[in-house]
Image (spheres, grey):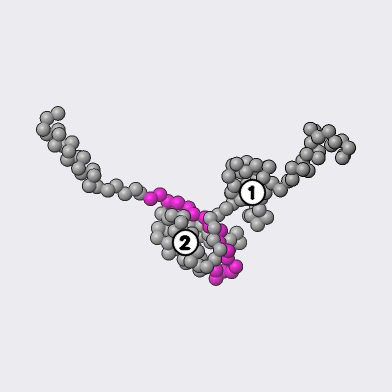
Amino acid sequence: MGVEGTLEYLSDLLSRTKKKKKKKKQIQTVALKIRMDCEGCARKVKHVLSGVKGAKSVEVDLKQQKATVTGYVEAKKVVKAAESTKKKVELWPYVPYTMVANPYVAPAYDKKAPPNMVRRVPDTATISETTLDHRYIQYFSDENPNACSIM
């Protein structure tokens, strides 16, 4: 390798440690559910969310009570900015019902959800988490010897 090769190696090693590599942020879309009552509320929310550093576009849907921010933003910063409007804010909780394994279990079903949408729930949610009581299930079970007398 020799002296020249060693010097080049050390030079490269030192030059890499001096340069701090910045990770390039990726464009993200952050959807929020915000309680808005009128056009004035929607304008206020849009104005505040447009001021978030890195926001490229802001869309507000008053009917669905939804605000969507697209750009080089972080979800935490967008939520914090939206909360500064003194409105009730949460990340958009709804997904298409075709993306949920059990869309009609109690935690997923929501009367206020937009059409064809249900709440996002973890895949561990099962039908056993619904409001059914196990006593009623046992009344009509095949393992219950008294089930015929009840029917």
Q: How many marks?
A: 2
- Verify whether residue 17 appears in magenta: no
Q: Is residue 142 left or right of residue 121?
A: right
Percent from the top left, x then y, of residue 119?
61, 50
Give the residue drawn at x 17%, y 38%.
10
Vertical side of 108 occupied by 1: above or below: above
Residue 108 got which mark? 1
> Of residues 62 and 137, which is closer to you in this image?
137
> Of residues 33 and 131, which is closer to you in this image?
131
Q: Quadrant of the N terminus?
A: top left
Mark 1 and mark 2: span between their CA atoms? 26 Å
Q: Which residues are magenta?
A: 25-42
Percent from the top left, x then y, of residue 108?
64, 49
What is the three-letter code of the residue carrying label 1? Ala
The residue to which callout 2 is attached is 80
What crowding class fits label 2: few (fewer than 14 Cα within 10 Å), some (14-19), or many (20 or more)? few
